[in-house]
Amino acid sequence: MCDTHPTSSRLCSRTFNVQNRYLTASNNSITFNAQTTQVPRITPVTVNINNNTYPIDEYTNVTENILSKTTRKLHLQVGHPIHTLRTLIEQHF
């Protein structure tokens, strides 16, 4: 049983589950154990942008969220942050 008196410095024995991480507190000591689970990821070999297919290599980092926005052509709207980013990337290369 836990001592709930406000002036008590004793910790209760509890376990908290946070995304496969376990934190146990008892007798003024804290133990942290992390468990990882590897889940196989299926990655595509190509990416389709504006009806053009491009191979994916180790430098490709475009996400599905970004790809879903390419149809809006925000990179062509002057003053839009994505257009500014596009311009900076083009100037770099």
Image (cartoon, rainbow, N blue to C red):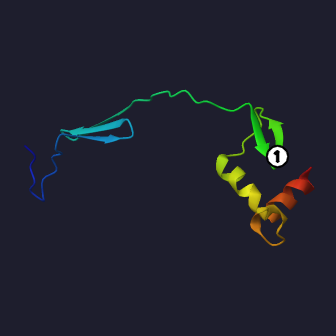
Q: Which corner quadrant holds the N terminus?
A: top left
Task: Residue type at mark 1: give it.
Answer: Asn
Image side of residue 30 versus residue 34, left or right:
left
Give residue 74's quadrant in the image: bottom right
Image side of residue 7 versus residue 28, left or right:
left
Residue at (77%, 42%) from the top-left corner? Answer: 48
Give residue 52's quadrant in the image: top right
Q: Where in the figure is residue 82, as x and y percent of width and height?
A: 77, 62
Q: Where in the figure is residue 73, as x and y percent of width and height?
A: 79, 62
Taking the view exactly as shown, the residue that stands out farthest to the front is 51
Taking the view exactly as shown, the residue that stands out farthest to the bottom is 79
**Location of residue 65 with respect to 15 vertically, above or below:** below
Q: Residues within 10 Å of mark 1 (few under 14, many from 20)?
A: few
Q: Identify residue for label 1.
A: 51
Element assignment for label 1? loop
Residue at (9%, 56%) from the top-left corner? Answer: 5
Residue at (72%, 45%) from the top-left corner? Answer: 62
Q: Where in the figure is residue 21, as x and y percent of width and height?
A: 37, 36
Towards the viewer: 21 or 63 = 63
Q: How many marks?
A: 1
Q: Where in the figure is residue 37, as x and y percent of width and height?
A: 45, 28
Give residue 19's quadrant in the image: top left
Image side of residue 5 versus residue 55, left or right:
left
